[in-house]
């Protein structure tokens, strides 16, 4: 019997396999950031251990960093201490670090692919649950806790129970105006936040093949939001074209050898998945969340659901709590929901293509008078690229705030947060209670919906806007 | 790591599903660089509500949390486990855990005991009738007991169970296989990227 892509990549990394024990997996790339690593380095020191393979480790500063005045010392002393701790640890253990102010600084899941360090067939871990983003290249990538960060630093390996495999096949093409974000939100609302638990997911089918690398990263990024261990997509010409000529990509004969191997990283025709989910791309429309987990979503054209309509008792109770928290009444058309702040950014939708999509909607239009729009590039290089293309001017002309790079309002660990009760349309990945600041209310949306919402002041898609003649 | 065999303590019914790690400890509490002192962040937003269960005298000293399904979903922050431990919790019982949370619990020494949803309901019923009632969780026999008649089994992956029972350090275990890691490293293709 053939093997799935996930099985191939997994098997290529098994250092040791023994009955009754999890496999010991070799880790090709360990990404580090300031929020989840300090205690891991302390653990190393306490045990008298060191970093086994500094050259397979990359650090950056993303969660705490301010997106204004990034060339000045961080004003919040607690954030500053955490960032300085990472700098000291990187210096002590000889790790490559892209600090705030460095041209390669940015969200850890944006800079890995951008540097060409994320490649097909790798195992990649990071103390961050959105690590599955790198799965878009056909890598097994997953989030780990701080104890495991210490484990990988010390050993470059990690004991892991082999997950089951799940295929999500999306037939047909996405309609015009429908994005990867709409597709993944649509999927999560169908399967629920634990639908992928215990699985490595392979996204496949025509609609996936037709996505750019940025779109594929958006899909894989949100694998954790439906409970999956990891999500990946078979590498193809789109993947190779993206990697080629990136700073850390192989060159010459080494490139040819790498590609020859990457081309073998496909699910065999006769491979069997433990579970399969099939979707029709034509059914996907602009999609938004109304509740407090990413599975509580609906097409933008729908209304806020009535908890009484949920058959499952727990779903009903969860919907009631969510509507109460979100300050929403059942039956309200989603398009009538007024938002205070729109956030475009994050490891889900903070790449250049996302900014292009948002700018295309905003060109020649203005942000609504009582709405605030924050545009936060996922990395400093994305910021520079956007400026080269004149997108910054489009955002600024529309009345948006054009910021520096980082996680920003997705996690609200830095100064970018919402006030209690403030409502956002956000291109990030989580609408949990308080995620964007205590008492914040979040609607997850695509970059296109975010931009249209900023213009209209209520949840909207570009199709809802008056024509722009520019 | 300390050995873990059995624990008896006050059960706390937390009747919600999908308790993500942002609820267990909001991100603003993650900036500390030490390994302790996270108790203030535990359920920080919910604790502002005087009606929240941990604000009740009866449950103040609770050590066994009994929660709805999908506990610990979302962010990979191990601080969620540390916050529960720093507050005094030794065990969390639920019918489903977020994968990363469950893994982090096993590493840090918090027992994440998975039971059938009906067992969670039985424990909630018991605690409703006996507020402040004690629950015993025995890792050796993989059983949860409460009151006179409630005795149920729970699930935990065998490897984590063995490690907790014996107080084994995970990193030392992996380092004991160093020769195999070295041999694997010798076989890695030259085109794999490096950062230095």
Image (tube, helix red, strand yellow):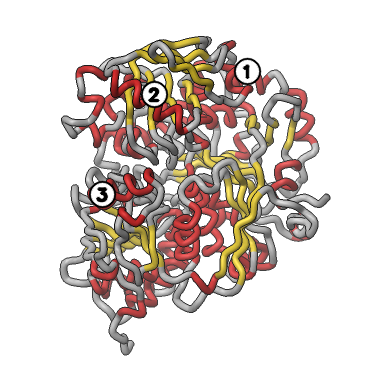
- Percent x, y for residue B140? 57, 12
Badges 1 and 3: C-beta atoms under 8 Å apart? no
Q: Nearer the viewer, mark 1 or mark 2?
A: 2
In this view, the residue farthest toward the right is: A1
Q: In which quarter of the image is residue A242?
A: bottom right
The image quadrant where one finds the C terminus of chain B is top right
Q: Which residue is drawn at 74% across and 56% down?
A: A267
| Horizontal side of residue A416 vs A315, given as left or right | left
> Which residue is disc 2 drawn over?
B123
Q: Dot 2, crowdedness within 10 Å: few (<14), some or many (≥20)?
A: many
Considering depth in this image, is A457 or A259 the residue closer to the camera?
A: A457
In this view, the residue farthest toward the bottom is: A469
- Percent x, y for residue A337? 24, 65
> Which residue is disc 3 drawn over?
A417
- The mark nearer the N terminus, 1 or 2, is 2
Q: Can residue A321 be seen in this view?
A: yes
Considering depth in this image, is B165 or B126 the residue closer to the camera?
A: B126
Q: Dot 3, crowdedness within 10 Å: few (<14), some or many (≥20)?
A: some
Q: Which residue is drawn at 41% across and 62% down?
A: A383
Tell me the subunit letter for badge 2: B
> Which residue is disc 1 drawn over?
B172
Tell me the subunit letter for badge 3: A
Q: How far apart are marks 1 and 2 (CA)?
A: 37 Å
Q: Distance between the residues labelled 3 and 2?
A: 38 Å
Badges 1 and 2: C-beta atoms under 8 Å apart? no
- Percent x, y for residue A264? 78, 56
Q: In this rendering, do the residues under marks 3 and 2 share a single chain?
A: no
Q: Residue at x 40, y 48 (%)?
A: A312
């Amino acid at each position: 019997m053939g093997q799935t892509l996930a099985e191939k990549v997994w098997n290529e990394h098994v250092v040791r396999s023994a009955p009754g024990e999890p496999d010991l997996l070799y880790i090709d790339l360990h990404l580090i950031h300031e929020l989840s690593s300090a205690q891991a380095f302390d653990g190393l020191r306490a045990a008298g251990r060191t970093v086994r393979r500094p050259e397979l480790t990359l650090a950056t500063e993303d969660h705490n960093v301010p997106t204004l005045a990034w060339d000045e010392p961080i004003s919040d002393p607690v954030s500053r201490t955490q960032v300085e701790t990472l700098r000291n640890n990187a210096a002590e253990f000889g790790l490559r670090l892209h600090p705030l102010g460095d041209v390669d600084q940015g969200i850890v899941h944006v800079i890995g692919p951008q540097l060409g360090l994320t490649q097909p067939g790798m195992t990649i871990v990071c103390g961050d649950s959105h690590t599955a983003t790198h799965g878009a290249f056909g890598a097994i990538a997953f989030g780990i806790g701080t104890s495991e960060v210490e484990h990988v630093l010390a050993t470059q390996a990690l004991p892991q129970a082999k997950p089951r495999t799940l295929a999500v096949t999306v037939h047909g093409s996405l309609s015009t105006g429908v994005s990867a974000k709409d597709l993944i939100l649509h999927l999560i609302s169908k399967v629920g936040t634990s639908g992928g638990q215990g699985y490595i997911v392979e996204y496949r089918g025509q609609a996936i093949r037709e996505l750019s690398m940025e779109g594929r990263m958006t899909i894989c990024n949100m694998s954790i939001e439906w409970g999956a261990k990891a999500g990946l997509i078979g590498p193809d010409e789109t993947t190779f074209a993206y990697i080629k000529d990136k700073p850390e990509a192989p060159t010459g004969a080494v490139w040819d050898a790498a590609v020859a191997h990457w081309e073998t990283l496909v699910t065999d025709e006769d491979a069997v998945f433990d579970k399969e989910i099939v979707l029709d791309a034509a059914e996907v429309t602009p999609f938004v969340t109304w509740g407090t987990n990413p599975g509580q979503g609906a097409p933008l054209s729908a209304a806020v659901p009535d908890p009484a309509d949920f058959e499952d008792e727990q779903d009903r109770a969860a919907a009631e709590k969510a509507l109460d928290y979100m300050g929403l009444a059942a039956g309200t058309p989603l398009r009538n929901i007024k938002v205070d702040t729109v956030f475009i950014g994050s490891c889900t939708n903070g790449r250049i293509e996302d900014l292009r999509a948002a700018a295309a909607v905003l060109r020649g239009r203005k942000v609504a008078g009582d709405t605030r729009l924050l545009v936060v590039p996922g990395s400093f290089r994305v910021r520079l690229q956007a400026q080269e293309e004149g997108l910054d001017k489009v955002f600024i002309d529309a009345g948006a705030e054009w910021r520096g790079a980082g996680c920003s309002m997705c996690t609200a660990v830095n100064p970018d947060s919402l006030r209690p009760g403030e409502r956002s349309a956000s291109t990030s990945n989580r609408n949990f209670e308080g995620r964007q600041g205590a008492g914040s209310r979040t609607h997850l949306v695509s970059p296109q919906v975010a931009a249209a919402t900023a213009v209209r002041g209520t949840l909207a898609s570009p199709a809802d806007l008056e024509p722009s003649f520019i | 790591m300390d050995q873990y065999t059995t624990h008896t303590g006050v059960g706390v019914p937390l009747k919600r599903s999908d308790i993500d790690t942002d609820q267990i400890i909001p991100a603003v509490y993650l900036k500390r660089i030490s390994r302790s002192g996270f108790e203030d962040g535990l359920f920080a937003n919910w604790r502002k509500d005087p009606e929240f269960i941990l604000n009740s005298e009866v449950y103040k000293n609770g050590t066994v949390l009994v929660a709805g399904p999908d506990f610990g979903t979302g962010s990979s922050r191990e601080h969620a486990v540390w916050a529960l431990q720093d507050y005094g919790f030794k065990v969390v019982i639920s019918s489903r855990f977020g994968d990363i949370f469950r893994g982090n619990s096993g590493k840090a020494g918090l027992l994440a005991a998975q039971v059938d949803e009906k067992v969670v309901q039985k424990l909630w019923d018991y605690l409703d009738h006996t507020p402040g009632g004690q629950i015993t969780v025995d890792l050796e026999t993989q059983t949860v007991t409460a009151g006179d008649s409630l005795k149920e089994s729970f699930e935990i992956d065998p490897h984590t169970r063995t490690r907790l029972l014996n107080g084994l350090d995970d990193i030392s275990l992996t380092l004991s296989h160093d020769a195999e890691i070295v041999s694997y490293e010798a076989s890695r293709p030259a085109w794999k990227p490096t950062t230095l």
